[in-house]
Amino acid sequence: MVHLIFATPCAYVILRWLAPLALPLWGKAALAVLLLAASQFHLWNRLSSGSVFAPEFPRPVVLALNGAFGAILLLAALQAALDLGALAAALVQGGAVAIPDTLRLAAAGLAVLLAALGVANAVRVPPVRDVEVAIPGLPPAFDGYRLLQLTDLHLGRLFPASWARAVVARANAAGAALIVVTGDFIDGSVAMRRDDVAPLRDLRAPDGVWAIPGNHEYFFDYRAWMRHLAGLGLRMLPNAHAVIARAEARLVLAGVTDASAPGAGEAGPDLAAALAGAPTGAPVVLLDHQPRAAKRAASRGVALQLSGHTHGGMILGLDRLVARGNNGFVSGRYEVGGMTLYVGNGTGIWPGFALRLGRPSEMTRFTLRAAPRA
């Protein structure tokens, strides 16, 4: 079914963009076959690895397939705009209005250019983005405390060990006291991704490197990945918490499992279990891969929730659709019932749709500040 869905924009491009072009029939047929092949990118992924989420092609091929697939989607949108413009003109003029080939070809050129730009934006090593957050009741000892969030790394063919090493170097240079990773480390099994995740062993921060699983860890033997990530020195917080101390002052770092966990036969997110035994009155920073349950976290007194999962919506405009599937949360800062929610755009991105236009990747450095008294 998903492959038929992805073929729909391609069918529209063939019928409304390609068919009217003044090209020989054999040329149209050949181009239609190429378009259909590119639209089935996710089918080729499945055939290459057994999973739609893990393309096992050389990186240049994955880059090219993402660019071609993105160009089809963008061309479908541009052709729809041309068709609506032609319809509006026809209503005004009282007769049919033809779309010239020059406009069709210009739309195709623009789609290819935007797709190439989108892929380039998606695979860069992102800069550090600074965000300051006021925390009610933050002890003076933690005023100015800095922590760095990485999220949605999706390490694999598109984001290999060389990219991971560059991310680790930039993260370590950010000067944060603590580093967190809010899920979706990988796309593939431990055997497939062992070398790609190896650079994560070198992440360093004075108060440690802490993490939670994302939904993709459950697609590829969750328990094996939890063991392997822990073996790399990442301190996993599945429905658990840690306490960061500065003399007598305390800050609670809690984590929950992903909402998709029950579907894989694993324990779902349990905030009560995560906070059990936490010191009373200490501010809580919660790691939750998906942002949709933010209101529930706010009702439990969480001060700051860090999430990912949405990739920021990937493309400006498309982010509105992604927000609807995540209770309105898609990118950046939100105030939710007295709690600050931050949804990171992602450090990497899923290799099945690696385009970013207007929603840049990031690693996010938070500086905690004591909220002024009311």
Image (cartoon, rainbow, N blue to C red):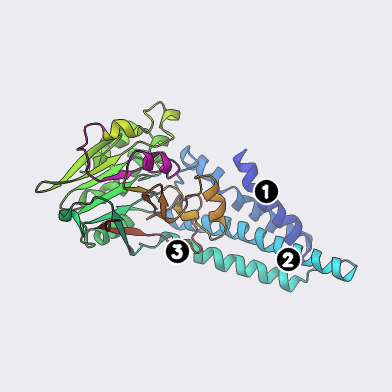
Whether label 3 touches label 2, CB < 8 Å: no
Work out which residue is located at the far bottom of the displayed protein and give it.
102
> In which quadrant will I find the N terminus?
top right
CA gap between label 3 and label 2 equals 27 Å
Q: Label 1 belongs to which residue?
A: 8
Front label number (2 vs 1): 2
In the rendered image, the vertical position of residue 95 relative to residue 372, given as above or below: below
Q: Is residue 88 magenta?
A: no
Q: Which amino acid does label 3 sit on?
A: Asn
Q: Label 2 belongs to which residue?
A: 82
Work out which residue is located at the far top of the displayed protein and give it.
265
The percent position of residue 315, horizontal first and vertical second, equals: 53, 59
Q: Give the range drawn in magenta.
A: 276-301
Left/right placement of residue 68 relative to residue 188 reads right
Q: Which of marks 3 and 1 is nearer the N terminus?
A: 1
Left/right placement of residue 300 relative to residue 310 reads left
The percent position of residue 160, horizontal first and vertical second, equals: 35, 53
CA gap between label 3 and label 1 equals 26 Å
The percent position of residue 5, horizontal first and vertical second, equals: 64, 44
Q: Label 3 belongs to which residue?
A: 121
Q: Earlier in the sequence, mark 2 or mark 1?
A: 1
Q: What residue type is labelled 1?
A: Thr
Q: Observer-nearest residue: 117 or 20? A: 117
Q: Which residue is drawn at 67% across and 63% down?
A: 78
